[in-house]
Amino acid sequence: MSVRSEPSTRAIGAIGSLLSGIAAVCGSFLVVGQSDRFVGAAIGETLLEWFPDQVFAIGIPLLGGLARPLLLASATVGTALALGVLAWTAMAIGDRTSRYRIASAGTTLGLQLGAIGLVAADLWSGLVGGALGAIVIWWFTRPVNGTNTGDQSDTNSAAGSAWSRRRDILGSGAVIAGAAAAGWLLNSSGQSTENSESPSARARATIDDPVIDELLTQAKQQSFELSDAEPLVSEGFYQVDINLTGDPTITTDEWSLKIAGAVDSPTELSYKELLDNPVEHRFITLRCVSDELNGRYMDTALWTGTPIAPILDDAGVGDRCCVRLAAEDGYYHAFPRAALESGFLAWGMNGDLLPRAHGAPVRVLIPGHWGEINVKWLTDIEIREEPATGYWEERGWHGSGPVETVAKLHHKSRDGDQVTIGGHAYAGTRGISTVEVSTDGGETWVDTELTDPLPGIDGVEQARDAWRMWKYEYERADEHEVVVRAREADGTLQAETESEAFPSGATGWVRGTMYGRQG
Ligand SMILES: Nc1nc2c(c(=O)[nH]1)N[C@H]1C(S)=C(S)[C@@H](COP(=O)(O)O)O[C@H]1N2
Ligand SMILES: [Mo]
C-alpha cells in the first residue's frame, strides 16, 4: 500500500519535504558551523556577489548592522526551502518505483548531497546534510495503512496513521533540533578556541603609551556635546566589509606583510618587525563611498602605527605607477602608488590593539581617500607596472579616489525657542575652514562655531585628515528648513549638485527640517 492511498498525501509530502530541507540545512551546520562552508552562508555569499549594490548601497544604510544577519537568515531559510523542493522531487520520483522508500530517501540523499556539496564546496557538509534530509524522507514515505506501521498498527488505521505521522514529525523535529544544537555547541566552542589566540581576545589589550591618553583626552575636551552626533573620536565606529560569516582571525604570529611584484627586493615583514618601526598616533577619519549624504558611515579614531613610505623604500618600489593590496578575507584593492606612499600601517585604534572588526592585526590607512582602499587584514602589497582593478571597482563603484567634501546635520534640538543644530564636516586632506548654515532655505548664510582641529603628529601640526565638528545656536519658534555646507581650507565651497552615493560618492548640501515649538 503506498502513501498515495492516504487522504492527505500531498500535505504529508509537503511537510515531510519541508522538514527534510530544514534537516539538511541543520546537517550542514552540524558539520561546519557558521563558516563559509555552511550551505546557507554559501548561498548568502552568492547573493552578495550577485546583488552587491542592493545589499551594500541600500541594505546597509537602511538596516545597518542588521543587514548581514538578515541576509544570512533569509539565505538559510531560502536554502532550506530549495532543499525541501529537492526532497519533494525525490518523493515524486520514488513514487513511481516499487521500492518506494529506498528510492525516495536515496534520491533525496543524492540530490541534497550534490546541491550542498556543490554550493558549499564541502563534501561532509553535503553528506551529513543529505543524510539527515534522507532520514526524514524515509520516515515520511513509510506506508501507514498496512502492516508496516510497527507497534502502532491497530484496528483503527486512521488513528494509527495520524499517530504515525505525528511520530515522524516529532522525530524530524528531534533530528533538526539535535543537529542545530550540536552545530551550535561545536561552533561556539570552536570559535572560543580561535578567539583565545586571536588579537581580539588578547584584546582591549591596550597600547602602553601615555601620549595616547593625552590625545584622547584632548579630543574629548575639544568635542561639542551634541546628543545625536559622535564626539571627535567616534564611540561606535562604523564597519563595512564583504564578510558575511565572520571576519578573518589572524594571530600576530601568523601574520606577515609581503611586498612583491615590480620591486627591487621582495620583502616579507613580520608583525614584530613592523612594530620595530617608528610609532605614530594619528587622528584619521574614514568615510565609505556608499555613505549617504547625511549618513553615518563616517567616523574618526586615533590610530597607532607607522608610515608606510620607508618600508616601501626598503623594498625599492621605484616610480612604478600602481599598487594592488590584498587581504586575508579575499578582498583586494588597486590604486596609484603615490597614494600608498602617504599611507599608514595601523595596528592600534584608540589605545587598544586594532580590533578584529577593523582589520586586526594590521590595516592600511590612506589619507583623504574613500574607506574602501583602507584595506583591513592586509597581507599583500603588490607593486605593479600596470593598473589593476579593485573588488568594488569590479562591481561598478568608483571609490579609489579622494573623498567628497561634506557637512552633516546629525543633531537638532530645541529648548523653547532656543535651537541647537550641529554635526561633522570632513574634506579629506583638503581640510575644513568653515561650515555655513542657512535657516531661510539658502537665501542667507552664517558661519557656525567649529571645534579646533585635532592635533597632528608631534602635537603641533594639525591632523591633516580628520573631521571637525560644527554647532550653531539660535532662536526661532516655527518649523523651518536648515541647509548646511562646508568650505575647504582654501575656501572652495562644497559641491551643491546632488548625486547619489552610487557610484562615486554622494554630493550636494544637506537639508533638514527643524521642527517648530509646538511639535
Ligand atoms: N579586507 C577588507 N578591507 C576592507 C573592506 C573589506 O571588505 N575587506 N571594506 C572596505 C570598505 S568598503 C570600507 S568603507 C572600510 C571600512 O572600514 P571599517 O570597517 O574599519 O570602518 O574598510 C575597507 N577595507
Ligand atoms: Mo566602503
Image: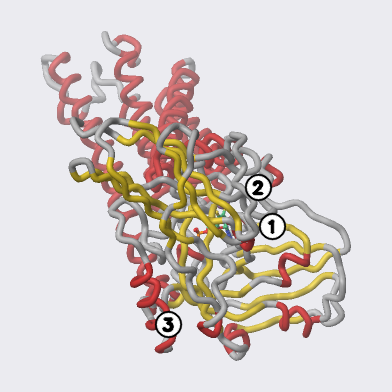
Spot occupied by residue 10 in the image (x, y as percentages of width and height): 34, 13
| In the image, the residue with mark 2 has its CB under 8 Å from the nearest atom of ligand 1 | yes
Spatial CA distance of label 2 from label 1 is 8 Å
- For this rendering, which residue is in front, 309 or 103? 309
Residue assigned mark 3: 212
Residues at marks 2 and 1 touching, judged by CB atoms closer than 8 Å: yes
Q: Is mark 2 on a helix, strand or loop?
A: loop
Q: In the rendered image of this protein, does residue 355 appear above or below residue 315?
A: above
Residue for badge 1: 333
| Residue 126 is at least partly visible in this image | no
Report the side of 243 relative to 372 (left or right). left
Looking at the rendered structure, the kind of residue marked 3 is: Ile
Q: How far apart are marks 3 and 1 (CA)?
A: 30 Å
Locate the N terminus by quadrant: top left
Q: What element carries label 3?
A: helix
Q: Which of marks 2 and 1 is nearer the N terminus?
A: 1
Mark-to-mark CA distance, 3 and 2: 34 Å
Residue that badge 2 annotates: 392
Residue at 39% in and 79% down: 202
